[in-house]
Image (cartoon, rainbow, N blue to C red):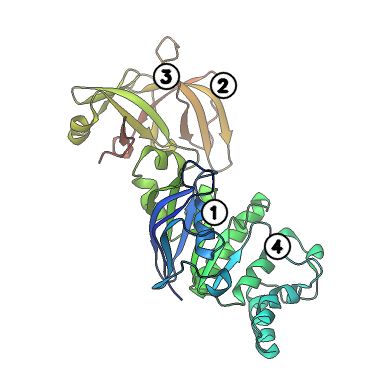
Amino acid sequence: MASVTFDSATRTFSGASTPAVDSLDLQIEDGECVVLVGPSGCGKSTSLRMVAGLEPTTSGRVLIGDKDMTGVRPRSRDVAMVFQSYALYPNMTVAQNMAFALENMKMAKSEINERVQWAAKMLELDQLLERKPSALSGGQRQRVAMGRAIVRKPTVFCMDEPLSNLDAKLRVSMRGEIANLQRSLGVTTVYVTHDQVEAMTMGDRVAVMRGGKLQQVDTPERLYARPDNAFVAGFIGSPSITLFHAPVDAGHALLGNYVVDVPRSVAQTAGKEIIIGIRPESWDVVAPSENGIAIRTNHVELLGSQAYLYGEMVKGNGVKTTPERIAVMLHRKARPQPGEIINVRPQADEIHFFDATTEQAIR
């Protein structure tokens, strides 16, 4: 096994005015699973393809272990790729699909059979080895694609949105299976997804990208609790955090008529305006007579174990004061109706502060 290192790795496509990946510095430790996540066009898939050798670096370099991969062909990198589209050969059986790469490596038939049987048992495909892909479900096809990568016993797994073609329920079960498989094999894994829930549940660490640049890399827990900037705070978490642009005066920020105590470091750094972030679970519903923020209900999502209210801030006379949509987690039995006003108050130790100009977190 080996680590993967992006050393100022840059990829600029012909005719593009900006790099698809811009000076990426990222160290992925031996046996670690790091998930690259971000919106479409952020450079996550290009970064993955640079590891696999499918995209060359324009500048900088990618290392596997201590070996510089510049100019090394994909077949010589000992990297196994799992694609979004499965990419199975339709005329081959499951066993033949899994054995194909090993046959090209001129491996002995006995060892090929041993590896195929080993991977098939691990992935619960041992009863399906004689079927062709057309006779398999989406989840079974994805397992075959995983098996084809596993039998090679590679140094690095590269997985490019392998679950995006599956239905929601199957995605949940498959991401658990992949996470368990990666841990049991201990293979260094670079995993790409646009689904932040998938990223948070699968990665030892998560790397958030935007516009080709790395925004933050950390454990899922720290990424959620201590985002480095407003973009990361807004991208990680579902429903997403509510971000308010609030004026600051004399060490206080105003959310409508509600006064937020601003830490001294924030008051000294922020200037005349600050971005305040509050996650849905960081609101307390309080009585109308208590000091709080009045929210007019737009709609409520009932999710069985939880309920989320989406609304807008209002003054006492019902006049809208801010365009931000506010998300509030409620008790699962709460049933506010559209137009109903509830009173909420942010939990002081759960408030995030960001500079209004740079959008960087203020600690």
Alpha carbon separation for disc pair 1 and 3: 37 Å
N-terminal of the pair, mark 1 or mark 4, is: 1
Residue 328 lies left or right of residue 146; in this view the side is left
Q: Specify which label sits upstream in the sequence, 2 or 3.
A: 3
Residue at 59% of width from left, 65% of height from top?
81
Q: Amino acid at mark 4?
A: Ala
Name the residue rendered at 52%, 34% in the picture.
308
User: x and y percent of residue 205 in the render?
Assistant: 42, 58
| Image location of residue 126, percent across then percent down | 72, 77
Kindly state the secondary structure of the residue where label 2 is placed. loop
Sequence-first disc among 4 and 2? 4
Residue 14 to residue 357: above or below: below
Q: Earlier in the sequence, mark 1 or mark 3?
A: 1
Q: Is residue 40 left or right of residue 208?
A: right
The residue indicated by pointer 1 is 45
Q: Which residue is mark 3?
A: 322
Instruction: Write the residue at 38% across / 27% down.
Output: 244
Q: Is residue 30 something that shows in the picture?
A: yes
Local SS, label 4: loop
What amino acid type is highlighted by mark number 2?
Pro
Are circles 3 and 4 on residues that touch, CB within 8 Å?
no
SS category of the residue bearing label 3: loop
Q: Residues within 10 Å of mark 3 (few under 14, many from 20)?
A: some
Q: Nearer the viewer, residue 32 or 260?
A: 32
Dot 1 surroundings within 10 Å: few (below 14), some, or many (20 or more)?
A: many
Q: Which amino acid type corresponds to the residue marked 3 in the rendered image? A: Thr
Can you identify the residue that label 2 sits on?
338
Single out the residue that lies furthest toward the front. 15
Give the quadrant of residue 98.
bottom right
Proximity of marks 1 and 4: CB atoms separated by less than 8 Å: no
Q: Above or below — where is 70 with respect to 219?
A: below
